[in-house]
Structure formats: C-alpha cells, structure tokens
Image: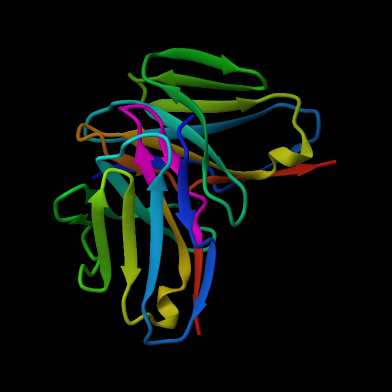
Amino acid sequence: GQNIDQPTEMTATEGAIVQINCTYQTSGFNGLFWYQQHAGEAPTFLSYNVLDGLEEKGRFSSFLSRSKGYSYLLLKELQMKDSASYLCAVKDSNYQLIWGAGTKLIIKP
Amino acid sequence: GAVVSQHPSWVICKSGTSVKIECRSLDFQATTMFWYRQFPKQSLMLMATSNEGSKATYEQGVEKDKFLINHASLTLSTLTVTSAHPEDSSFYICSAGAGVTEAFFGQGTRLTVV
C-alpha cells in the first residue's frame, strides 16, 4: 500500500529552527509537496521537489532524497504565525496526490 | 498563482436536507478538480475526482448517490451532499491542478448538519 509518515506534533521556540521529516512509500513518484494549513483553513502551497536536493525559498527550505523516500521541511527564524499543520504529499505514478496526516507545529515564545 | 474560489465558506443545515458547494477556477481552465473531506485533526481524504464533461471518479467507500458531483464547465464543479446527516459534518475542500505541479485549493466549506 501507499504510505506517508510524518510526526504528529512538534514544538519549537520563536526565532529557532525546526525540521519536519516525511518518509514515503508510494507506487511511483512524480513530485513531493509541502503545504501549510492553519486551523479551519484550506492548505496553502509551500514547496515542490521532484529532484534530489535542497530547495530554498526564504525562511522555508525543503529537501528530497528519492533513493531514501525521504523529505524534510526546514523552517528558520520561527515566528508565532508559523504555528500550523504542515502536510507532506506525494504524487504517485497516476499523478494522484497521496497525503500525510500532517504535523502540528506549536511555536512557543 | 492560480485562484480557486469555493462557496459557501460555511453552512449549517437541518438533517435530511441537501447542500450544494461550488468550486470555481477563476483564472484558468480546470478539466479536473478534486473534492476532499477533512475531519478535525485529520488529514485530507480524497472523496472524488471531478472530470469536466464526464462522470466523477469516486474513491472507495464514498457513496456516489449521496455526494453528487457535477463538472459542467471548465471553470465550475459542484458537490451536493444529499440528505445530509450529522455525521456528514466536516470541512470540504476542492482543488484544481494547473499542470503537474502544485494543486490550488479553494477556501474550504465548513458544513454543520444539525
């Protein structure tokens, strides 16, 4: 079966750095996505990786290793507004998005 | 990025009634749209794939007669929850893809059935 694993919840301090890991086992691979979702709102797109390596976009970076079925989202200079759920999703061989359960990130002052 | 508009953002209805949710792609044509349901503290669950001009493809366990999907144009898909019951209360989200990269989501609809 297809499976995406990410931690349920993480806590970090304002101004610090946090890394959210995601491992996946899917039938085929056509890209990995990270989305941010605040409570009661729809997800918003953060990043897309299809090749191995690190993609940096401002305070957020995303890393992919296809051979290991592994990705992480790195958030730097954490702000209180970064408190949200972070969803990892993979497009399989049929280009269907397979979603992880999400990681709830709690930022403390 | 592309804009997907979903309406209404929230709705309260009585048990046994039907509710229609609209999803529009405002600045691009979407041959395919996706309907998700999300229960509290859970991830997105794909309900069905809406295809313009043809029948929707439903995921296993989703009742097609209860969740009616119509994709009559390249910019509009609708989801109708028929004979709604309290267990249908959930957050419903549509999305449309622009190519093979990111999916764009509507604002979501909070449905409460009383």
Residue B16 image point, x, y percent: 37, 87
* Vertical arrangement, residue B114 with respect to residue A44, above or below: below
Which residue, as the protein is rendered here, is positioned at the far left?
A: B54
Q: Quadrant of the N terminus of chain A?
A: top left
In the rendered picture of this protein, how many numbered marks are placed on residues?
0
A95 or B79: which is nearer to us? B79
Residue B55 image point, x, y percent: 15, 56
Q: Which residues are magenta?
A: B95-109
Q: Quadrant of residue A61?
A: top right
B54 or A30: which is nearer to us? B54
Q: Residue at x 47, y 48 (%)?
A: B5
Q: Quadrant of residue B19?
A: bottom left
Q: Quadrant of residue B70?
A: bottom left
Left or right, residue B85 beside residue A79: left
Residue A96 image point, x, y percent: 27, 39
Q: Residue at x 23, y 70 (%)?
A: B63
A4 or B68: which is nearer to us? B68
Q: Is B1 part of what is drawn in magenta?
A: no
Q: Quadrant of the C terminus of chain A?
A: top right
* Vertical arrangement, residue B64 with respect to residue B108, above or below: below
